[in-house]
Structure formats: structure tokens, C-alpha cells
Amino acid sequence: MIELERDERQIVRELCSMSKEVIPSAVAKGRIGKVWVPERDNPSFCLIHSGNFVYLAGICPKGEQALELRELLIKNCSKGFITPSDERWSEWLEETFGGSCRIMSRYAMRTDEDLFSKETLNNYLNSIPEGIQIKKMNQSLYEKAMSSEWSREICSDFETQKDFIHRGFGFAALDGERLVSGCSAYPISEEKIVVKVATHREYKRRGLALACSAGLILSCLKQEIFPTWDADNIPAAGLAEKLGYIFEKEYQVYTLGNLENGLF
């Protein structure tokens, strides 16, 4: 498998043209993520990887190409959510990985700027427990987020600290000096971001994720950036609905676990 440079990715745009997902399009345009193909000359399929998002498009491979793709998925994408572009890819994944392949549900949310209530969002931002502070994320808070397993999800899509400072922004909830909740905006184009949010288990159900997310959405609206939301569980979808999103669809993704070390 060949990893494409950003200025080579136009060769996979047609493979991704049928996708309604925003991330494959952004990766194919060279803005974010990574792309692999079996050959540069008219590739029959591609693997797209950005953060914990993995996307397979094109014609399912056979023989040696299938083995190479399997190895690449295990090595680079075992912790990601693999989204097949059609049923053929779903069948390929299940046949290739068998019982090591787990199917999970995710929940696509939609909205438009008119559905966001700035008054409601400001109320969420200001309705936090006593002793908690909401701050805009900076270099120090990025380092705190990346130092713990639960909070790494907030900023894990960014390649480096420098990448986050240059392209990203976010909000964090602090109990004293302790990071307890936060969200970030991962840019997928000049006009769109993906919202990533996480809360420490001891601080759930206190409105902290709601407050951080409200702050981020208000910041997006001020900058004329559209915040997209994709939920990995029903509570996250419920959180999004409180913020002004509407449930669009449930869809299936695959996870492989840690196959490289023989674990699931």
C-alpha cells in the first residue's frame, strides 16, 4: 500500500465522491488525515484515516492487495472506527477479520445555524457548578488533555501540540487545576469543524460537557464556522440534541481491537 502526499490525493476524489461524510472529502482534498492506495495509477480502492475515523471506498481487494490492506488496518487503524462505503465493504471486513471484528452503532446528527439558540447556549455556558471554571484551551490545557486516557479523546485528532495551537481551538472545565471535561474543534475545511468532547467519569451529569460544547458552538458561530456532530453513543446524541442538533440516522461502524498484540 502507498501513502499519498497531500498534493497527490486528487486521484481518490472520485472514489470518495459518493460519500455523504464530510471527513473523506476533506482528506481527499489534502486538508487533513492520511490516504493509502494500492497503486498511484487509477487506484481501485483507498483507505482514509483521520483521527479515529477510518473510511474504505472503491472495489474490495482480493489476493495480495487484500492481505496488504488487512495488515495496514491492523497496524495503523486498530483503534479507529471503520466506516465501510457500502455493503460489499461490510462483508469484506467480516470475512477478513471474522470474530475479531466488532460492529458498533454511531449516530449522525444534523442542524443548521437557525436551530442554534444563542440564549440557550449562553445559559448552558453559565450554568456550571460552584468551583468549576470554563476556560479556552491553550498549550497547557492541551498537554493536560493528552496526559490522561479519558481526556486524550478531546485532542487526539491533532497530529501534534503545534498542530492544535495552529488549527484547533476548544474549551475546558477545570476543578481548581484539574481538567475534568472539555471539547475541541477539529477543522475539516475552512468552514466546518468536528466537535470532540469528553468528561471524567467522576464529573459526569453535572452539565460540564454541555457548558464546554456550548462555549465552542458560540465561538464557531462568531467565526462563521459550522460545527458538525457525530455521536458514538445515545447519551452523546442526547447531549447534541440539547445543544440544537437533530438526530439524522444511526449507522454501523467496525472496530478491530488491538489485533497487532493479539487482543480484542
Image: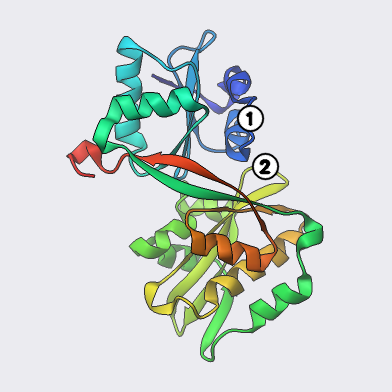
Residue 34, percent across and down? 49, 32
Classify residue 129 as left or right of residue 113: left
**Dividing the image into 4 quarters, which one contains the C terminus?**
top left
Figure coloring: rainbow
- Vertical relation: 2 (above or below) 80: above
| C-alpha gap between disc 2 and disc 1 | 9 Å
Residue 80 sits in which quadrant?
Answer: top left
Which amino acid, mark 2? Ser
Which label is found at residue 248? none
Residue 86, percent across and down? 51, 27
Q: Determine the residue positioned at 73% across, 46% down.
A: 191
Q: Are marks 2 and 1 in contact (CB under 8 Å)?
A: yes
Which element type, helix, strand or loop, lies under badge 1? Answer: loop
Residue situated in front as seen by the camera: 187 or 163: 187
Give the residue at mark 1.
Answer: 29
Residue 95, percent across and down? 31, 25
Give the residue at mark 2.
Answer: 189
Q: Determine the residue positioned at 47% across, 41% down.
A: 252
Asked if residue 158 can be seen in this view, the reply is no
